[in-house]
Amino acid sequence: MVTREQLDKAIQTQHRSGGHLGRILVEQGALTEQNLAKVLSIQWGLPYVQLGSIEIDPDVVKAIPQHIAHRHKVLAIEKTKRKLKLAIADPLNVVAFDDVRLVTGLELEQVVAAEEDIMAAISRYYTGGVDLEEAMRQAATTDIDIADEKTEDISVQELRTLTEEAPVVRLVNLIISQAIGDSASDIHMEPHRRSVQVRYRVDGLLHDVMTPPKQLQAAIVSRIKIMANLDIAERRIPQDGRIHVVIENKEYDLRVSTLPTVFGEKVVMRILDQSSTRLGLGKLGFTPATLELWEGMAAKPYGMILVSGPTGSGKTTTLYSTLYKINTTDKNIITVEDPVEYQLPRVNQVQVNPKAGLTFANGLRSFLRQDPDIIMVGEIRDKETAEIAIQASLTGHLVLSTIHTNDAPSAATRLVDMGVEPFLISSSVLGVLAQRLARTICTNCRESYAPPVEALHRLGLKPEQGEEILFYRGKGCDRCKGTGYKGRYGIFELMPMGETIRELVLKGASADQIRQQAIAEGMKTLADDGILKVLEGATTIDELLRVVYVDQ
């Protein structure tokens, strides 16, 4: 029963921030998901279904694409030639009915189910997580008794005992192995009041995978911390560690980060595939002309080349692939990184350690006494690092680094803003590569279509051109888990520092003036390269507009 006090509190929250009253009561712990579903079924005269107690044909479930099931929290549970029985958490979600009816072409019969049961079923049927779900079930039935989220009351010995339980070990192993199998870049484990949410970042976007019971939280987190050589007794401050795993003869490093939150420790694991460092530059998405220019810059004996873009845009992969290309036996290569993400053969890699006084700038100073040919600096963040890197490039060393700017022309003005003298920039920088990562269309379900006039207009195309050019999108299938995308591809903008651009930098020109000159000299902008990849059928208009600003 919901008390008057709980109801009043929920109503106040609803007035303040909106939302469904029932959902607020669940979040406040006044109602369980199952009780809310039963109340809604009575309120709207619909059957209530407990999904865990019925048999569901996996083929029926996949009548609805995964992204629609995830977005609307719905699950197909029965199907005939004309009708689909749909389990839904919110009977008032008319948009869900419209979307499902549109993609299936079937009449809909709705039943109500608990949201957490629907999401668990989606995880099981769409992500191939039957083993994962079974591991979670086994772990949940082991003798792990944790009354609430206050895990600081558990002793270290109790935590160690929990992490040695076979089902918990298997569950954590499966969470990691499935993420690698799904080509995820990150695993997120997020504690909430009464549950733990596991999510994978695949092709740049986060997807819900499973929701383990709250009672498993301490055991799962502690197991990961033990694997990463972290202190399981310390739950008040963030910690960082590393896990090395071998799956199907491939090596992976997992960079582990823990963060204390009000409901326990949040864990993020960045998955680093060691084989990706051997990915050829030609497979990253460069056009032949851009690749030739970039490889030419990387072959220079001295000077600085920069890669710019936001976090997660693939800068590290480009730099490592470039180092792999130019890493010959007659070169001495040294890197300073924060953190070292991949171990490269025959490369001397240094991890930044500010607590010990080892910064990018200090590391660079030491490098110059190590007889280097090529230096890679993880990121240029300040004037001191920039000036030392530039001095190194002017004294016979090739320097590669990254910088955070929106495009290639802005890199020069960003260095000036840091306090670097324009004459140092113009005399040292060979070129700047800006990049983004766009999801590629799934080749298994790719289909042609006619885009709306508005989309063509945003690409600078006329409506009649839409009839002459074939545009593609992904329909959604099991291989891409209903998203229509599989994998990612680079979108690039390479600006060589020609004489005219060097003069503009010396004169203190704006980024816009530098950009106009670079375009006049033949630079293809991020938008140009992205549009080319849309026209080639590699990605979609929507995806391009998501990652790149296209100036009409």
Image: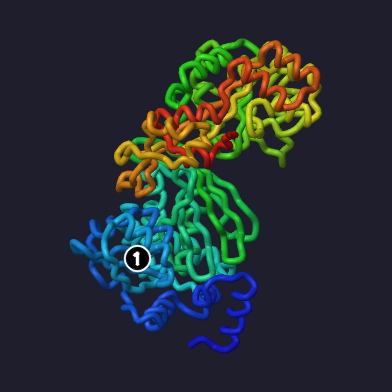
Q: Secondary structure at mark 1?
A: helix
At 43% from the left edge and 38% from the top edge, which residue is drawn? Answer: 540
452 and 67: which is toward the camera: 452
At 33% from the left edge and 78% from the top edge, which residue is drawn? Answer: 46
285 and 380: which is toward the camera: 285
In the displayed structure, would residue 449 be above or below residue 430?
below
Residue 300, image x and y in percent?
60, 11
405 and 377: which is toward the camera: 405
Q: Is residue 209 left or right of residue 270?
A: left
Residue 165, image x and y in percent?
39, 62
Residue 111, image x and y in percent?
32, 73
Q: Visible in this render: residue 343?
A: no
Q: Which kind of residue does numbered mark 1 sit on?
A: Arg
In the displayed structure, would residue 227 be above or below residue 160?
above
Residue under numbered circle 1:
137
317 and 290: which is toward the camera: 290
In the displayed structure, would residue 536 be above or below residue 181?
above
Rendered-image quadrant of the C terminus: top right
At 42% from the left edge and 25% from the top edge, which residue is drawn? Answer: 283
Name the image quarter holding residue 152. Answer: bottom right
Residue 65, image x and y in percent?
34, 53
Q: Is residue 10 left or right of residue 415?
A: left
Residue sticking out furthest to the front: 464
Q: Is residue 377 left or right of residue 468?
A: right
Categorize mark 1 by other alpha carbons within 10 Å: few (<14), some (14-19), many (20+).
Answer: some
Q: Is residue 392 left or right of residue 146?
A: right
At 44% from the left edge and 78% from the top edge, which residue is drawn? Answer: 36
Q: Visible in this render: residue 364?
A: yes
